Image (cartoon, grey):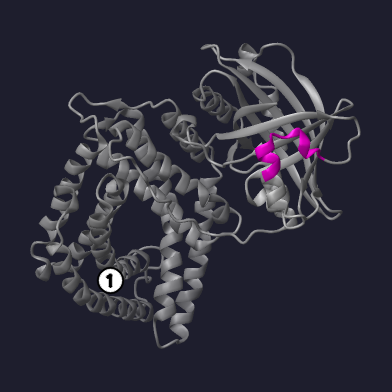
Amino acid sequence: MSDREIELKLVCEPAELERVRRAPALARLKRGRASGKHLHSTYFDTDNLALGDHGFALRLRQSGGACLQTLKTETGHSGDKTGALARDTGEYEARLPRGAAGPDLNKLPASLKSRIQKLANGNPIAPRLVSDIRRTVQYLETLDGDVIELALDKGALRAGEAKELAVSEIELELKEGSPESLYRLALDLSDIATLRVGFESKSERGFALLRPRTPMAIKAETLTHAQDATLEDVYAAVLRHCLVHLTSNETATVEAHLPEALHQMRVALRRMRSALAIFRPAIGGGMADRLAEEAKWLANELGPARDLDVFVGEILASVTPRDAALSRLAARADAARAEAWDRALAALASRRYTRFLLEHGLFLAGRGWRLKRKAPRLARDFAIMALTRRHASVTRLGRDIETLDLESRHELRKRLKKFRYGLHFFSSLFDAGATKLYIRHLSQLQDVFGGLNDVATAHLILDGPLAAAPGDTRAAALAARIFSWSEKRATKDWKGALRLWRRFREAEPFWQG
């Protein structure tokens, strides 16, 4: 039997599960009585986890004397119609004889059986992971008539004798109705308990015990639209792209404290705010404005950690000579950096962050925006107007580029970055050859602006958290040396930028062709 499963996962501490279990707010939604289950599941794979690596989870579950075989075909984040945070999976179930020791591939559709055998490549498919879960299930019916299965799971994942991971989570599975109801319920639950959106299945987390993963920063995915795509479809795709970029870097930021992952989260937030601003003349509304404000809040919470990462890892690391004064400043910078990271991680663990993600998911799932009366139907028509405005903003400031002061140069850098975001959002709506050459010119121009960012970061840090105390002439002299070093680099980079600016200005704007 095959089925489609749309679910939203929330993870929490065990005490928070009890808050949800006893929540009076759920009483009015309950349909029938809650039931308890002991789910003992064994996941099967090859020794090199070939099935899991390709999005399959094959398990046998013993419950109440029955043995149920399930193959899940996991594709990760779903499209905008399920809000990007909910997972949309295929599920193939078959009953096996009680006490069955292994899966029966003959119970699968022929195409899936062939796919599994090809991935195994003759290697044995054997038990790799055990999931031992106590589950409480309650069916809920919303005021709109949507039916949701609320599952409260507590237990452990075990891989081998010594590797174990505790499980404490909530699964909301849509049984009837719209995915919007999952987000509305999750938002209600987030008022009751401290929850986090879960992005990995039990099998993914369990297999990570067998083969620990190297944390990685994830750059934004490529956006592809049909050239006749509607404005609403492209709006949804762009906002989904920004949300997925943000959440894809959360684990590496929170668990591994990877500076590049935190940087990518900030980039995702900048892209999100830029997208909401670009589209605002034609589409948006009150919730879009709220999401922009919340993205700004989160960017401000993550910002100090990123700025100090740059200051310590790129600016201070390049300053010479290495003397006692520089060592003292580096020690202070390390302490400030640790404090800034604590602030960033606290924000990512907060209820406010969880609400931000869930509201963004609901916005996408329900298409909760408003298309303004004179907005064009086709995204391509809107893109022409939006890119023209961004291009004009850049060229207006750069008209007298050779006489710009340092502050204006930095402003030009920021406008170029926002312009590039717009190009990435819309470029697939136009001829690929022309867009590729134009974006290459812009990318080369942006690449030489690193020195300007160093100047801005040095001033931000040395005039802020690491400012010299009044009367500390040594610290003031060191700050002046760092300013001088970063400004020299910026001056050198600026000479290259002038040459590339002329090339960029001569390039034909592809959207006007």
Judge by depth and name the residue closer to the eye, 461 or 363.
Answer: 363
219 in relation to 28, above or below: below
- Graded by Cα atoms within 10 Å as few (under 14), some (14 to 19) or many (20 or more), the crowding at tag 1 reads some
69 in relation to 322, above or below: above
> Could one spot residue 455 in this view of the protein?
yes
214 in relation to 4, above or below: below
Q: Is mark 1 on a helix, strand or loop?
A: loop
Q: Three-letter amino acid code at disc 1?
A: Val
Please provide percent x and percent y for residue 316. 42, 76
> On the image, which quarter does residue 140 sit in?
top right
The N terminus - image quarter: top right
For image coordinates 28% across by 46% down, the residue present is 426
Is residue 63 on the magenta stretch? Answer: no
Judge by depth and name the residue closer to the eye, 250 or 64.
Answer: 64
> Could one spot residue 12 in this view of the protein?
no
User: What residue is disc 1 on?
Assistant: 448
State which region is magenta. Answer: 103-114
Magenta span main SS: helix
